[in-house]
Image: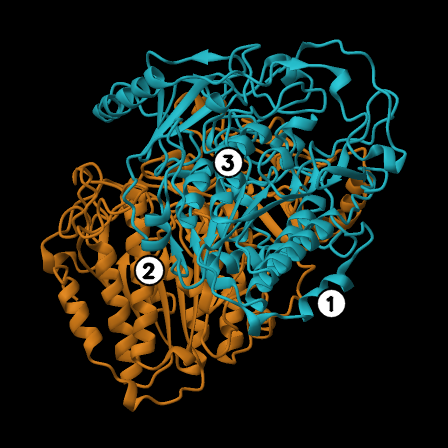
Chain colours: A cyan, B orange
C-alpha cells in the first residue's frame, strides 16, 4: 500500500461489500488492537470528561467491558512481549538485570530482542491455518532475527521501534518502516511526522493496512490474526489533518479521536464483510498513560495513581473491551482480574489449539468469562513487575506493594515526574523502598487511587497478608527467570541498513561495534 | 408515612398503575434529585471502576449527560440555597464575612437561614399551580421561619440539618425529622442510624415519600415539583440492610447503590404512571466528594483535583443527567458549561413562568441546550466562590485561579486533608494565596486534573487572560453582595423544641441565648 493513500481509497474499499459470498469459517478470526501509552481514563466509557470516543463506547455497549484488566509491565516492549508469548517478561527475557527493578525496552541501540526459545501467538495459530499480520509497532527487537516475519507473523506493516526523531542520519538513523521483510522508507523521511504541527497520516495508513488484510483473508476464506498496534498516542503524538484541532483535549485528544474512528471503521468493516459473528476483537493498551508527557502529549489514567513506568494502578491498569457479536453478551461488565498474557491463552482456546506444555504460561483462558460471563477465575493474582523485581501483587480487591518507587530524586529535579501533582507519603517514593516485611496494602474497591494504606494494626491487614503471602511465596519459589535480553546496547546495531535499504538507496553506514551496559534509569 | 414502612409497601404502591386514567398536563412535572457529597466520579457513566450504578447509567443513556455541570459552592448549604434561588450564595446571603474566603453552612447552632427577601423555586412555581415537596435534607436554616413550608414548599419529609450524631440531649439535641411543619422524631432515636454497622432505612423512606407524592399529585391531576434530596452519601454514610456489604466499594458504595436503585425506582414509577413524557428529571449533587472522609465514608471525583470544600474541579464539578423521554434526545452528551442555579431558571422556563425581574439571577435557561441539543450559551462563565471571595473563573476550556487554598497547615497536621495524595505545587496551597495580578490558568480540556499550569510566558496565557479579565471585572463591578446570613452561632437556636415536640413529649430545654461569631476554619 502506498504511503500517499488517504481516505478516499478507504471509502472505495468499504464500498465493495463481500457479504453475499461469505463462508462460515470454523476457527474465529482474532483481532487484538493494542494502543500505545493510552490510559484507562482516555475512553469516554471509562470517564474521560471530553467523551470523545463514540466508537469505543459503542464497542463496549455491544461487547464486554473489563475494568480490572492489566498489562504485564508498565512499559511498551515487555508488555508487548508478554502479550505475544503469554508469559511474564521476567520469564520471556524482556527485562534487565543491569540494575535493580529497572524498566527496560528496545530503543534502537538495544542488542537483544525476543528469544528464539519463545513461541509467539502467530506461530501457534499456524496449527489451525491462521494467517497473521502485525500492523504498527513491533518493539520486540529490531535486528533481523528478531523481526516479526522471523517470529511467526506472515505479514507486517510498521516499524520495529518508537517513532522518535527526527534524527541526523550520521549520528543516529531514523526508524525504518517495513512492509513485510523489507523497509519501505523511514519516519520523518518517506513517512512524515510533522513535529511542529503534529500532522501525520500514519494512523490512516495503519487503518487501511488492517482493512486490506481483513479483506484479503476473508476473500481467501482463511482464518486470520490481526495484531493492530498503532502508536499515535505515544509521544510525539500525531494525527492526520482531518482530526488535528478537533478534540477538546488538544493534540493527544486528536490522536485518540483518530484511533477511535479507526476502531469504528474496522468494526464496521467486519459487519460489511459479514464476518462480525466470526471475529473476536479485543481492544487494550500496552501500559498506562505517560503522565510525564502531559498535558499536551500524555493521556489520562482516570482516578488511578501515577502512570507509565510505575507499578501503581495508573501504570498498569488498562482500558479493555472484548467484542464478538453473537458470542459475547452485549453491554456487559465483568470484573475478572485479567491481563494481556491471557490474550495469548484465550486466543489459542478460541482457535481450538492446545497451549504449549513445555513452559510456564502466565495467561489464563478467559473464554468462560467472555462467553459465559462467569467469574470463576476470581482468585487469580496479578503480578506487578519492574524489571527483575516483583513490586506488587493484587489478589481480589487487595493490592500489596512489596517495593515502591516512582522515579529518582535526580530525575525529578530534571523535570521528569511519573506522578505529576500526586504525592502519597511513603508510597510514591523517590527512592526504591523495600516493604517486603510489611507490605503496603490497599483495598482497590474502596480506594482505587491508592491513597489510603490499610493500617497494619487492623485485623483486615493481617487477614489480607495471610492470604497474599503464600501466593507470593509460591510465585517466587517456582519462578525460573529467562535469560535477560535487555542488558546490552550498541550503536552498531541501530537501523543503519535494514533489509531492503539497497533498493531504495537508503543504506547508512554505522559505527563499529562497541557494546555497553544499557543505562536504565527508571 | 410510617418510619417502619419497608419495601413490601413500596411494591404494593408500584402495583397500582394509573396509566389508563392519565391526563396530559400542560406544565411538565419537575423532579430535581440532589445528592449529598456524591462526586463526579461516583457514577459508572463517569468512570467509577466499580460500575455499580446501572440505573443512573441507564438514565444517562435515555437522556442527556452534562460533563461540565457545576455547583455554586463547594459546600452543602450555599449550594442548595443557590439551586433554590437561582442566585450565587454571595447574593442570596449564604456566606460569611467573619473571615476571608471561608466555607460556611448551617450547623444546628447557626442563627441565620434563607432570607425572607429571597424567592425560592417552589414559590415561583405556584403561579402555574405546582404542588411542591422536599424530601430529605433542607439545610437552608432550621429556625421556624427558615423551614421549607415557610418558603414555598407545600410538603416536607426530612431534616433541617445534617444527620450528625448521636448526641447527648443535654449538651446538644439530635436533629429532628419533620413531616411537613411538625417533627416526627429525631435521628438516632425514632429514625435509626447505626453508626457501627452503617444500617439505616432512611433512603427507603425517602424513596417511598417521593413515590407517594408523585402518585398523589398524578391522581389529583396537579403539576408537581419534587425536590428529592437524600443524604446517605454524606458522612456518616448509611444504607439499608439489603444494600449493606453489596458494593465493591465498601459502605460508601453501598449507599451509592441504594441511591442508584432508588433513582431507578422513581423513573420506573413515572413510566408505570404513564407520566414520563410529562416529567422533567434532573440528577446532580450538591458539591464534590468529601475526600477527607475517604476511603470508607468519602466518594470519588474521578480525574479531578481535590474535593469538597475546595474550588478545584473536584470540589465543584458535579455529576449531571437530564431525563425527559420524548423531549430530551436519548444518549446525548452536551458540553455546555452549566450549574445548579440554571435549574431555577430552567424550571421556570419549562413551567412557562417569567423569572423575577427585581433581582439578579445567575442561572440561565438551559432549555435550548436540553431540548434542542444546542450549545449556544458557550461563552457563559462559571464562578467558583469560597465565602466572600471569587476564587476562580472558568470561561470555555480555561480556568483562572485568582486565589488558591486547600486547607490550613494547622488542620492538615490534625489529619484533615481536602486533597489526600494530591499536591500541585503553588496550586493546592495550605495558606490562602492571592494570584489576582497573575492568575494560575489551566486548560481543562487537556488537563482536567489541574496539574499543569499554563506558563505565563506563553501567548496562550496572555490571550486567555485578556478574555477572562473583562468578565471578572464586569462581575465584580456589578456584584451587590447580599446580607451575610452565616456569621452568627448560638447554642440556644439548636433543635431543642421543634414544632410538634409537645405531642411527642420530645421537647428539650436549651441554654440561654449567647451568640458568638461562628468559627469557619476552611
The answer to whether tags 3 and 1 share a subunit is yes
Q: Please give the name of the residue rendered at 17% of the width and 60% of the height, measured from the top-left corner.
A: B500
Callout 3: 10 Å neighbours few (<14), some, many (20+)?
many
**Disc 2: host chain:** B
Identify the residue at image location x=56%, y=25%: A116
Taking A497 as reference, is A258 left or right? left
Q: Nearer the viewer, residue B414 or A86?
A: A86
- For label 2, the residue is B147
Judge if badges 3 and 2 mark residues of a common chain: no
Residue nearer the viewer, B463 or A215: A215
- Identify the mark nearer the N-term, 3 or 1: 1
Q: Nearer the viewer, residue A412 or B110?
A: A412
Q: Is residue B297 above or below residue A51?
A: above
Taking the image as shown, residue A432 lies to the left or right of residue B154, namely: right
The Cα atoms of the two marked residues, 3 and 1, are separated by 34 Å
Q: Chain of mark 3?
A: A
Relative side of B385 to B266, left or right: right
- What SS does tag 3 mark? helix
User: Looking at the image, is B513 positioned above or below residue A438?
Assistant: below
Asked which quadrant contains residue A183, the reply is top right
Q: CA distance from mark 3 to mark 2?
A: 62 Å
Residue at 18% x, 53% y is: B242
Q: Is residue A434 visible?
A: yes
Give the labeled residue for mark 3. Answer: A83
Q: Which mark is residue A12?
A: 1
User: Would you say residue B308 is visible in this rendering?
Assistant: no
Residue that protrudes farthest toward the right in the picture:
A505
Amino acid at each position: 500500500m502506498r504511503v500517499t493513500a488517504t481516505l478516499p481509497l478507504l471509502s472505495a474499499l468499504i464500498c465493495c461489500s463481500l457479504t453475499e459470498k461469505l463462508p462460515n469459517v470454523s476457527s474465529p478470526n482474532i483481532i487484538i488492537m493494542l494502543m500505545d501509552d493510552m490510559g484507562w481514563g482516555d475512553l469516554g466509557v471509562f470517564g474521560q470528561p471530553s467523551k470523545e470516543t463514540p466508537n469505543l463506547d459503542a464497542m463496549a455497549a455491544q461487547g464486554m467491558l473489563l475494568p480490572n484488566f492489566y498489562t504485564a509491565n508498565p512499559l511498551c516492549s515487555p508488555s508487548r512481549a508478554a502479550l505475544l508469548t503469554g508469559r511474564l517478561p521476567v520469564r520471556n527475557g524482556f527485562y534487565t538485570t543491569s540494575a535493580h527493578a529497572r524498566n527496560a525496552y528496545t530503543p534502537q541501540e538495544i542488542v537483544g530482542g525476543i528469544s528464539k526459545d519463545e513461541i509467539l501467538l502467530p506461530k501457534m495459530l499456524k496449527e489451525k491455518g491462521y494467517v497473521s499480520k502485525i500492523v504498527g509497532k513491533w518493539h520486540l527487537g529490531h535486528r533481523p532475527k528478531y523481526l516479526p516475519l522471523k517470529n511467526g507473523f506472515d505479514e507486517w506493516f510498521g516499524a520495529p521501534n518508537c517513532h522518535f526523531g527526527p534524527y541526523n542520519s550520521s549520528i543516529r538513523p531514523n526508524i525504518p518502516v517495513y512492509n513485510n521483510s523489507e523497509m519501505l522508507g523511514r519516519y520523518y523521511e518517506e513517512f512524515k511526522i510533522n513535529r511542529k504541527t503534529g500532522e501525520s497520516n500514519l494512523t490512516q495508513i495503519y487503518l487501511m493496512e488492517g482493512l486490506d488484510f481483513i479483506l484479503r483473508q476473508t476473500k481467501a476464506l482463511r482464518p486470520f490474526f490481526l495484531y493492530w498496534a498503532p502508536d499515535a498516542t505515544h509521544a510525539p503524538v500525531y494525527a492526520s489533518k482531518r482530526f488535528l484541532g478537533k478534540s477538546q483535549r488538544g493534540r493527544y485528544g486528536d490522536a485518540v479521536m483518530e484511533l477511535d474512528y479507526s476502531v469504528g471503521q474496522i468494526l464496521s468493516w467486519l459487519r460489511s464483510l459479514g464476518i462480525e459473528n466470526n471475529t473476536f476483537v479485543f481492544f487494550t493498551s500496552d501500559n498506562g498513560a505517560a503522565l510525564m508527557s502531559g498535558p499536551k502529549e500524555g493521556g489520562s489514567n482516570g482516578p488511578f495513581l501515577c502512570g507509565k513506568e510505575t507499578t501503581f494502578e495508573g501504570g498498569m491498569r488498562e482500558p479493555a473491551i472484548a467484542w464478538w457479536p453473537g458470542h459475547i453478551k452485549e453491554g456487559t461488565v465483568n470484573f475478572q482480574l485479567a491481563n494481556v498474557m491471557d490474550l495469548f491463552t484465550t486466543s489459542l482456546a478460541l482457535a481450538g489449539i492446545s497451549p504449549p506444555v513445555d513452559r510456564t504460561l502466565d495467561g489464563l483462558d478467559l473464554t468462560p468469562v467472555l462467553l459465559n460471563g462467569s467469574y470463576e477465575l476470581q482468585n487469580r493474582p496479578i503480578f506487578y513487575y519492574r524489571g527483575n523485581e516483583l513490586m506488587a501483587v493484587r489478589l481480589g480487591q487487595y493490592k500489596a506493594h512489596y517495593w515502591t518507587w516512582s522515579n529518582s530524586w535526580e530525575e525529578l529535579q530534571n523535570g521528569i515526574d511519573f506522578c505529576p501533582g500526586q504525592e502519597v507519603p511513603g508510597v510514591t517514593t523517590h527512592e526504591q523502598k523495600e516493604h517486603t516485611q510489611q507490605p503496603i496494602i490497599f483495598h482497590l474497591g474502596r480506594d482505587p487511587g491508592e491513597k489510603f494504606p490499610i493500617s497494619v494494626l487492623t485485623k483486615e491487614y493481617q487477614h489480607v497478608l495471610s492470604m497474599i503471602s503464600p501466593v507470593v511465596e509460591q510465585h517466587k519459589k517456582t519462578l525460573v527467570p529467562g535469560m535477560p535480553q535487555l542488558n546490552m546496547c550498541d550503536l552498531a546495531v541501530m537501523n543503519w541498513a535494514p533489509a531492503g535499504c539497497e533498493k531504495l538507496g537508503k543504506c547508512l553506514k554505522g559505527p563499529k561495534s562497541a557494546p555497553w551496559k544499557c543505562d536504565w534509569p527508571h
